[in-house]
Each structure stands twice: as C-alpha cells, then as structure tokens.
C-alpha cells in the first residue's frame, strides 16, 4: 500500500517536476536561420586590473558579421561569460545574436563575455568557469568597484586589442548575468546609468549575500534612474541562508513598478539554473532592445498612506534625472544657494568673489556683487539684509550683513570658522563650524562680536543648517557622518536636546554621507545635498527619497526659488541647475 501511494504521488507530481525544468530552446537559439551571416568569437585573458589586483580572468568577444568599424556598434556585456558564449550550452548567445541582428530585432551589437577573477594558479582555468575565487566579492558587493573595472579597465582593453568602435550612448549599452552575475549587472547600471541603461537579470541573487537584499528599498526611495530591466526567475529557485530568490525577485519587480521603471518580470517554474532564462533569451533580448517608450510608466504609488512622503508627492510622475534644467555654467565653484521672499535666487562663485542673482523674469544669472568677500553660505534675515559666512585668510573669515540696496557690508562676528548659516525671524543667526563640530549663535544685532559662543557640539563635521517652517527646530547635517541632527530652539535662541533624527544614506562601503547644504519646504520636509544626491525627509525625520544629482560633480547646496518658490535650485560645482517640484519652499524670514 505504501509503495502504491508513493507511485501515485510521483505520478501526480511528475508533470509539475518536468514543467519546472522543461524549457527547450527555440529555433533562434539552436541554429542560425538560412542565409544568416555568422559572427566571429575571439578569446582573451585579462590580468591587468588595478581595481581587483592580482586577478586573472578569461574573456571572449563576439563581433557580428554586420559590424562596420566606421560606425559605432552597440554593446552588451555578460558576466560569467563562459556560460553565455558557448554554442552548446543553455544560453548560446552567439547564435541568438546572429539571428536577431540579421532580422533587425536588435542593433549590430558587440558582445563581451567575461569570467569573474581568480587569484593564484590553483584550480583549472576552464571555459566553464574553473577557479572563481573572486566571484562573490566582485559580483555580490554593492557599490561602484565592478563598474569601474568594466568602464576604466576591461572595455578599453578590449576596444584597443580588437580595434573596436563601441558606442558611448548608454541607451545602446546593455549588461547581463545570472545569479550573482545578475545582481552584478544591475549594480553596474544602478551605479553608472551614464554607461549602461539596459539590464538582463536571470535568477538574480537580490538576497543578503553581501547586502543585495537592500535593492528593493533603495529603488523605492531613489529617484527613478533611466534603466530598462528584464527580470527572470523560477518559483523553485533557491531558499537558503542568504534569502529566498523567488520572493527577492518579486520584491524587485514590485519596487520597479512602484518607482515607474520600464521593466518586465517573467516568473517560471524552474530552479536555480539557466534553462528558463536561456529558453526565453531571444524574447528577452527583443524586449530589451525594443524602441524607447514615448513616455515612461506611471509610478505605482496608490498605496501611500497619509503621512508617507514618496517622491511621487514632490516630483511629477516620480521624476527623472533629465528633469534638471541648466541655468548657469562656467563658474569656478558655486555654493551658498538662497532665495529672497519674492523667489529671486542668489548664489556665490566662491573662488571668484562674486555673488549672482537670478530674478523671477531673468533667463540667466547676473552678477550682483563683484569683488566682494568669498561667501560659502548666505541667507536673508527678517530685516531684509543678506547675512553671509565668508572665507579666506583668518581675518577674512567673518559673519557679515550686506545691504541689498547699497551693497554696504557690516561685520557681525570675527575670529570665526563659518561654513554655512541660517537666520531666524527672532533675530538669531546660526552657523556651522565644521572643523570644531559645533553650531554657533550670533544675534543679528551684534557688531564686531569676537569669538561668539557655541550652542551645540559633538557633531561629525556639521555643514548644512536650516530651520523648520515654524522656526521651533534647527536641523544640522553631518558631512562626516550619516545623520542630520535636530535641536529645539528656546525663546532665548539657545538650543536644547540634540537628536540624530534623520538618517542619511551613505554610498556603499563608506561611513560618510557628505551631508552638505540643506533647505526646508513649506510642509516641513528637509532637503539635504549629499554624495548620493539630494536626500529628502519628512517632518518626522523619515527618509522619503533621494533625487539624483544633475551631474557627476558634487552638488553642495540647494534652496527653493523661482515662481511660487516651487523650483529646487542647486549649486553643482561649476554649474547651477533647477527643476520644478510639486511643493514650495518654507517662508523666508
């Protein structure tokens, strides 16, 4: 009876078990169609990496027959390259490429197939992978190291060795991988969308091997990046100490939909193998290389609760990096973004001792004060004067007030080390002393005050500083740490408490957020520039999202200005940008 039951159970389950692995390759993967020209595959070894020193790895280059060196070709990079380049394995990319390129389903594309690095001479360097001692470190780690390896080392090597003309257009550069190679492919595009904007992820390891389980949360709270991604996984994929692969990939798909990405998710019945991904590889590539959408999907943000501050509440359609508008360029170093009550925007070209103004109806910045002090932070006070922190030699480091009409300068405090400042309606000026880790208070009625006293300390390189809309709270960002502090303001202007209430996100592998200039909006949100972009927090200190920087160079200060003070202006190294938001700045004193 027991044997009969077992036989019956096996009989009932066998169709499901077969379905889980029964993914035969289609005609585009098994043979080239009649008349399809055959691309060539060349092999190489690469062992000159400085990003991953003392590693050696095997690689291959596929060059389609249609490749014309006079025309830039598209690019697709495959991690665990041996598994993809083989023409008798589960993927068979050269055959698929030949068929799809000949049919016009994808552009003329150079394929680069690269194995993970290995250290030492032990173990075989087999085409199937062999010694992969550095694989997990390279593939599963978050951050930009592997992207640097590809962009700065491997691709220049391949380009020079084979005399290739590769496109620099990120829309025509794709990257792929399976398992840890898949999360690696996603990380490269996530870190460098200026280089790669198409991702093929098969059985992706978006689990806690080296922190990759954080990606769904990061996607939900980071401005949508210009990445198209095809996800594939199977319901019978892994469930082990690192996490559950099917659930992790479903979390990824849900987060991508929430943020409004152009994505597709195929969940089959397979396990942790390349069978399902290989069977649908031609369709995956056709989808990935299809023309650009006329408009991106709307973010799926219908389930935000009343107090939730998703980016969709402050950026139209969830935003995109291209929404930044260049308003000024050619400066030495811009800083000290601020606005007057009418919404006119002011900033400093720090090294050139010049303050600029952009009026509500001005198309470009106009020099407002030339040959003046070097200003690193300034803000209008309740009396209409412009208060500023100045830099230079010791005698030049002061807190000053500038009369907007006469441009006359009056000194409030000397023998100070100011970085940035804010001014309250109650008549107190607060500035950050980054080196001392302190916040200093100066009454705006002061004249020539020497060495004003600190009202808060112990902050890890305080930098940006702002007031809540009701002016009951002071917020201070840490440049050297990972928090912004909040202080209660007493009637005498002194500070009480001091909590690390806002947790700034830091780049992978770093402990410092680069928390820099900041501003607040009318609803009490805090907007803080950082290494990762402009980080937004709600009035309760919860992270709402990160808005991408307008350029790779650092963004150091921000404010709301322009019509209805609804434009977010930022100072970004040699340029100034702005973008329209769905909110407006807090009232200027």
Image (tube, grey):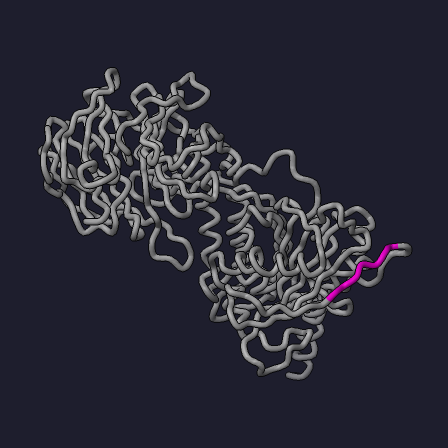
In the picture, residue 429 is in which quadrant? top left
The image quadrant of residue 418 is top left
Q: Is residue 167 above or below residue 443?
A: below
Q: Split into 4 quadrants, where in the image is the N terminus?
A: bottom right
Residue 586 falls inside the magenta stretch: no
Foreground of the two, 140 or 205: 140
Q: Going 22% across and 41% down the picture, which residue do you hit?
A: 432
User: Is residue 265 something one can see in this rendering?
Assistant: no
- Residue 38 part of the magenta-drawn span: yes
Q: Which residues are magenta?
A: 36-42
Would you say 561 lies left or right of 65 here?
left
Q: Quadrant of residue 352?
A: top left
Up/down of 112 relative to 402, above or below = below
Q: Please state which of residues 337 and 6 is positioned toward the viewer in this rendering.
A: 337
| Side (left or right) of 40 relative to 552 | right
Number of labelled discs?
A: 0
Viewer-side residue, 336 vs 136: 336
Of the pair 146 and 208, the residue shown nearer to us:
146
Does 141 sit left or right of 351 as displayed? right
* Residue pictured at 46% horizontal, 20% vertical: 363
Residue 77 x/y as whole percent: 65, 58
């Amino acid at each position: 009876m027991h044997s009969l039951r077992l036989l019956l159970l096996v009989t009932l389950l066998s169709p499901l078990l077969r379905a889980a692995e029964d993914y035969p390759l289609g005609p585009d993967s098994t043979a080239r169609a009649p008349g399809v020209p055959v691309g060539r595959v060349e092999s190489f070894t690469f062992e000159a990496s400085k990003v991953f020193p003392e590693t050696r790895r095997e690689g291959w280059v596929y060059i389609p027959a249609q490749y014309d060196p006079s025309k830039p070709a598209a690019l697709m990079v495959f991690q665990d390259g041996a598994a993809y380049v083989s023409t008798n394995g589960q993927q068979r990319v050269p055959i698929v490429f030949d068929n799809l390129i000949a049919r016009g389903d994808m552009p003329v594309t150079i394929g680069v197939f690269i194995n993970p690095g290995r250290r030492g001479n032990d173990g075989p360097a087999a085409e199937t992978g062999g010694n992969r001692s550095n694989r997990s470190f390279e593939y599963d780690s978050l951050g930009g190291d592997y992207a640097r390896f590809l962009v700065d080392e491997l691709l220049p090597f391949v380009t020079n060795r084979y005399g290739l003309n590769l496109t620099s257009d990120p829309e025509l550069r794709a990257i792929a991988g399976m398992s840890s190679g898949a999360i690696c492919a996603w990380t490269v595009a996530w870190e460098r969308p200026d280089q790669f904007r198409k991702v093929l992820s098969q059985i992706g390891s978006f689990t806690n091997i080296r922190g990759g389980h954080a990606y769904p949360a990061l996607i939900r709270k980071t401005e949508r990046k210009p990445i198209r991604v095809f996800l594939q996984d199977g319901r019978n994929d892994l469930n082990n100490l690192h996490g559950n692969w099917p659930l992790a990939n479903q979390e990824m798909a849900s987060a991508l939909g929430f943020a409004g990405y152009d994505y597709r998710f195929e969940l089959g019945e397979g396990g942790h193998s390349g069978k399902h991904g290989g069977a649908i590889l031609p369709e995956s590539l056709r989808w990935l290389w299809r023309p650009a959408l006329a408009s991106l999907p709307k973010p799926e943000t219908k389930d935000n609760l009343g107090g939730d501050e998703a980016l969709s509440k402050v950026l139209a359609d969830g935003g995109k990096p291209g929404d930044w508008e260049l308003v000024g360029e050619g400066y030495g170093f811009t800083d000290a973004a601020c606005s007057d009550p009418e919404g006119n925007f002011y900033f400093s070209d720090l090294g050139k001792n010049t303050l600029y103004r952009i009026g509500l109806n001005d198309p470009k910045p106009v020099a407002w004060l030339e040959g003046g002090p070097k200003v690193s932070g300034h803000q209008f006070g309740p009396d209409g004067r412009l208060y500023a922190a100045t830099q230079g030699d010791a005698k030049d480091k002061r807190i000053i007030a500038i009369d907007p009409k006469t441009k006359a300068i009056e000194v409030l405090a000397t023998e100070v080390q100011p970085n940035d400042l804010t001014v309250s309606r109650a008549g107190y000026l607060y500035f950050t002393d980054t080196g001392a880790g302190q916040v200093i208070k100066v009454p705006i009625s002061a004249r020539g005050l020497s060495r004003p006293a600190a009202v808060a300390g112990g902050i890890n390189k305080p930098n940006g500083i702002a007031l809540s809309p009701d002016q009951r709270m002071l917020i201070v960002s840490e440049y050297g740490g990972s928090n912004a502090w909040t202080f209660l303001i007493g009637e005498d202007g002194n500070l009480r408490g001091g909590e690390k209430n806002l947790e700034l996100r830091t780049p992978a592998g770093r402990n410092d957020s680069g928390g820099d200039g900041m501003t607040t909006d009318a609803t009490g949100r805090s907007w803080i520039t950082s290494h990762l972009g402009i980080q937004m927090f709600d009035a309760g200190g919860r992270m709402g999202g990160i808005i991408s920087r307008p350029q790779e160079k650092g963004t150091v200060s921000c404010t709301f200005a322009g019509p209805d003070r609804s434009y977010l202006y930022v100072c970004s190294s040699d340029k100034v940008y702005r973008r329209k938001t769905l909110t407006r700045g807090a009232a200027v004193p």
